[in-house]
Image: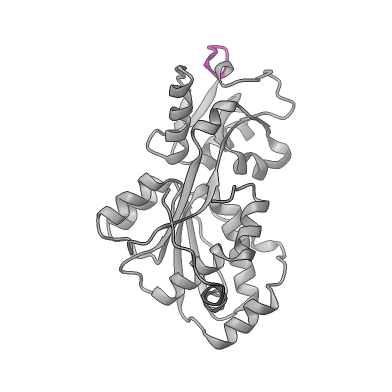
Amino acid sequence: MTTRNPRSHVATLAAAGAAAALVLTACSSSSSSDKTDNPAPSASATTAGSSQKVSGTVVVFAAASLKESFTTLGKDFQKAYPGTKVVLSFGGSDQLAASIVSGAPADVFAAANPATMKTVTDKGDGAGNPTTFVRNQLEIATLPGNPKHIRTLKDLTSSKLKVALCAKTVPCGAAAQTALTASHLKLTPVSYEQDVKSALTKVELKEVDAAVVYQTDVKAGGSKVQGVNFPESSKAINLYPIDALKNAPNPSGAQAFIALVESAEGRKVLGEAGFLNP
């Protein structure tokens, strides 16, 4: 949702050593992935951690679609640099932005489109230096085997189908509306969800036949859902910005976490989750 400044290799390594041991909490859903193992961090990152350390808690507000990848990065951080606590809160970007503007204490904000980040920076709560770290593209999520034989975005307009969309104020919902408008299609869903994970869950629970979500969410859904690509999604690719917050309680920790996200290790984790390079 915004664009960002590249950091030098040295700064990335030094910062990566900062934000350690992550305790993850979800804004819209709690994470249970702490039970799985993560690969050990690189030797270079460990070396950086010995030269510069960050203490205290680092609070990160992140778009719901980042849950899997940021959870993994959190675990990697925790294994490499014990002693620091990073709390991750996930939810709809618009809701997270509203919380920040209302005074919720946080160090980092990672949004799912530039417009939502702008609501924070315009209010003077952002550090004013957001950078794009990944992009994401829409996909239709259906039940396994695609029993309704959905092939195109236009198919979703059928009155015979139950479809869920993200709310129009949420980045995934805004992107879906952009794709529909570009295709001259009108779709009335049976429900508007407050974040993309909620829309995906509607499909997983068989409450709807399909939902328009991100490719990363279809991938995260595994065998519970099946994805259907549609060409109109190329007209609505979301840019994801990240920024330290102006009044961050732990500014050095914020920079350290951002450095990890933008490092080669961070890009690898995000790429494996299905995100596109910025």
Question: Exactly how many numbered labels are in the figure?
Answer: 0
69 left or right of 133? right
**In the rendered view, would you say 103 is above or below 117?**
below
**In the rendered view, would you say 150 is above or below 44?**
above
| Residue 66 x/y as whole percent | 54, 52
| Residue 269 x/y as whole percent | 65, 58
Q: Which residues are magenta?
A: 156-161
Please tell me which residue lies in front, 38 or 128.
128
Residue found farthest to the top: 159
The prevailing secondary structure element of the residues shown in magenta is loop
41 left or right of 137? right
Residue at 59 percent of width and 60 percent of height? 71
Please tell me which residue lies in front, 137 or 103.
137
Q: Is residue 21 magenta?
A: no
Residue found farthest to the bottom: 51
Q: Which quadrant holds residue 169?
A: top left
Residue at 55 percent of width and 17 percent of height? 154
Q: Which quadrant holds residue 247?
A: bottom left
Residue at 44 percent of width and 66 percent of height? 59
Q: Is residue 157 magenta?
A: yes
| Residue 250 x/y as whole percent | 40, 75
| Residue 24 x/y as whole percent | 54, 63
**In the rendered view, would you say 217 is above or below 49?**
above
Q: In the rendered view, how is the structure colored?
A: one colour
Residue at 73 percent of width and 38 percent of height? 223
